[in-house]
Image (cartoon, coloured by chain):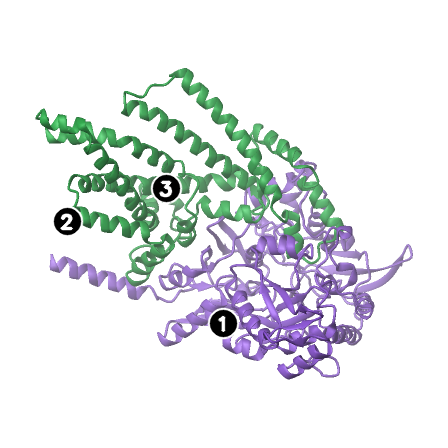
Chain colours: A green, B purple
Amino acid sequence: MTAYITRRIIQTLIVIVILSYVCFYLMSLMPGDPVDMMVASNPKITAEDVIRLKQLYGLDQPTYKRYYSWVSSIAQGDLGYSRTYRIPVEELMGPRLWNTFLLSFISLGVSILIAVPLGIISALRPGSKTDYVVNFFSFAGISIPSFWLAIVLIILFAVKFPILPAGGTQTIGSDGLGFFSSLGDRAIYLILPVASLAIQQIGRFSRFTRSAMLEALRNDFIRTAKAKGLDRQVVIWKHAFRNALIPLITILALSFSGLFSGAILTETVFAYQGVGKLVYDSIIANDYNVAMISFVISVSMVLLMNLIADLAYGFVDPRISYK
Amino acid sequence: MIRTFAKSFVLVSLAATTAFAAPTNAELKIGISQEFESLNPIIMSMSASAYMYRMVGRSLVNLTPEGKWVPQLAKEIPSIEKGTAKIIEEGGKKKITATWEIIDAAKWGDGKPVICQDFITSRTIATSNNVTVGEKEQWTQVEKIVIDPKNPKKCTFTYEKAKWDFYQLAQFFPLPTHIEEAVFKKYGSQKEGYEKNSNYVRNSTNPGLYNGPYVISEVRLGSHVSFAPNPNFYGKQPEIKKIIVKLIPNTGTMEANLRSGTIDMISTLGMDFDQALAFDKKAKAEKLPFDVHFVPSVTYEHIDLNLDNEILKDVKVRQALLLSINREDLVKALFEGKQEVAAHNVSPKDPWYTVDPKVVTSYRYSKRQAGKLLDEAGWKMGADGVRAKDGKKLVLQFQTTAGNKTRELVQVYLQNQWKQSGIEVAIKNEPARVFFGDTMTKRKFGAMALFAWVSSPENSPRSTLSTAAIPSSKNGYSGQNFMGWSNKTVDSNLDALDVEFSAVKREANVHNILKEYTNEVPVLPLYYRSDISVTPKNLKNYKMSGHQFYETNNVENWTLN
């Protein structure tokens, strides 16, 4: 087991290095570098300014040299400097990563807590009224575009019935409040964005749970367990649900891997200070340092969550072993 | 149960009515949709940063909404007539020296006086090779600053060239030497070392960094900036006790934020034109307590023609393109007449503006005349409704920034009008990043490119019209004459304009340029854009400028009574 984990971690690190170079190279292929963008927006930039700035940014160097320089800085703990926001990357991304994590984690948690029981109930009574109702709302949740849902929620709960804030991360100036007041304030600002994200995820997860449970309930060992006279709860939870968990773990692991990637539409509509829009803007503005850090975080999360999923399979299904 | 529900309903309804409570001088929340960066005046480059910086920082001079240069930190603007500026000759080169004196009451937020050394500090830092200031010329134009030994607030600037606009130093901001000099000494030798460690980044709420009517009390990049009055401001103390500028990146939700009371007003950098038009109607119909302002600006929306294109090399084709489009109808149909048809690149807010027929050739919509010119150019109407010459169809590529709703609507409108004159237009739009970062800067556009120039009154059009500004690999693609237009009369007038100290002669130079510009049609002028903002009805003394020196220059006079 330890050898397996060590091997996977080494593989993960190698994949991160290779993918980061590929990403760096692809970004360098994009038309227009940061200086070109500056020239386009400022007619007074001269040819001398262009040469000076390209040298300063290292844009006159080949891609591999720039990549080496970037990796060297990272190795020394310097994440670089955002040329768009004019501040160090760690200061720019730190609070936003935390905000995005909070939003994604809470919405994912809420979704799982609601969707998994709904999916199981639906699977236990296929074709029933309950099943139809759950299916109807699941499909509705999946089909509604998130930006539309977000705007509807704002109009309903911030404009028509102004009981919740239309957007933001926290009340301006609330930093000086006590811990619990601050916590309550943050919670109020999270309600609408979490609802907007969770409604979609609930639809998706309840459909996956329903289908995984239905599949598990069709197995011979379930019939045997029932024939043995086992308690219905034991059959559902110990035998059926445990077997249904394997596909669910895959889906959940992939969802968890996006915890730090940000929900660009939701964050933008709710003016929520997360990384989603920051990453998009940094790619568009050629802000290499910000874009690369967020890329490395995303890749690392995907690989890490896949490793965790692989390990979790073994705990859920004793037939799976690691070599 | 019913009683509880009714109680909740009443509470919620009450809350709904209080959402439109008029803001008071206690606090004003302004919505913007554009991102901002750290507010170091020598490094910042975003419009939203400039909008906010004007609340906390002032420069020697400023341009009023009426387009007049007035002193701000300076006691007066030096001039040759008054003898406070002189043309000198040094090493065979004509230069200017000007005496500037900073007003006695000008102080930084920590009470330290604003002195000439602060301008030397900013110039020294901005011209360092390790600091990423985009345009160095605005700093290097001042070759030397010599402080009067008897008065640290009085100094003589020596300018490297004798140019008439030497006094237009609205972006020559001072930096507090007592705070920033130490940072530069410590980190200035490292690449980007100063900007990473500047107090504007590390300690942005230090009041000593600002000399305007407000100081910054809180900065959250990507969220908001809070401002509090600066007790050491040299001018009138601001009426509004707290201002918050809040970023709402999605313009679609700007109105909802306004209606919910999250913000009290929408800045010039907040709303799209179509949204403002719709909101204006709603505000009037629902009697909402907001004013929607549409103010003509110096932003010039136009189509650059690529003169390397074989079809567009013929001036008759270019003139026909302009005659084929009904721009009066376009602004009525799409903008309800709230944006004005452009005659050329100089806006009506500029003292150089003219529509005198002796100077400017105007092109009123005439399909018949356009057809005649195209016939003369050899482009005959084909059976399929598209003109052709020597078997080649009159097809032109038309590009703009993808996703810009207004521009895409304008494109379709024009495409239809050109079709009626037998000109086929193929639309090929690109994301702004590719369009501006590559296609335009490297002159890769096929024939026509629709975009806007933002300028200021009495601004030399050298960077967009001179032959030397045609982007090429030789000049590092640094010019903005994307058309590739080369005209000797224009070049000589541009050279003369820079060094002409007579206002009358300068106007004549510009009019000579406009004559060539409107005769040769290297660009199709469309319309001058209007700036938009939404303010609460009780906001007084608010005046939009229509140029890049925003209304926040006047923020100390705003009042909410």
Q: CA distance from mark 2 to mark 3?
A: 32 Å
Q: Is B289 situated above or below A257? A: below
Residue A290: give x, y in percent of width and height. Answer: 54, 41
Give the mark nearer the N terminus: 2 vs 3: 3
Identify the residue under disc 2: A129
What residue appears at the point 68 percent right and 80 percent down from the top-left corner? Answer: B362
How far across and how far down the image is residue B125, in percent?
69, 45
Quadrant, the C terminus of chain B:
bottom left
Q: Nearer the viewer, mark 1 or mark 2?
A: 2
Q: Amino acid at mark 1?
A: His
Above or below A88: residue B436: below
Quadrant housing residue B346: bottom right
Mark sitting on residue B429? none
In the rendered structure, the answer to whether residue B81 lies left or right of residue A258 reads right
Question: Residue B135 location in percent, x, y?
Answer: 70, 53
Determine the image quadrant of residue B67. bottom right
Is B313 located above or below residue B285 in the figure? above
Q: Which residue is mark 1?
A: B293
Residue holding disc 3? A104
Which three-letter amino acid code belongs to the residue tagged 3?
A: Ser
Q: Secondary structure at mark 3?
A: helix
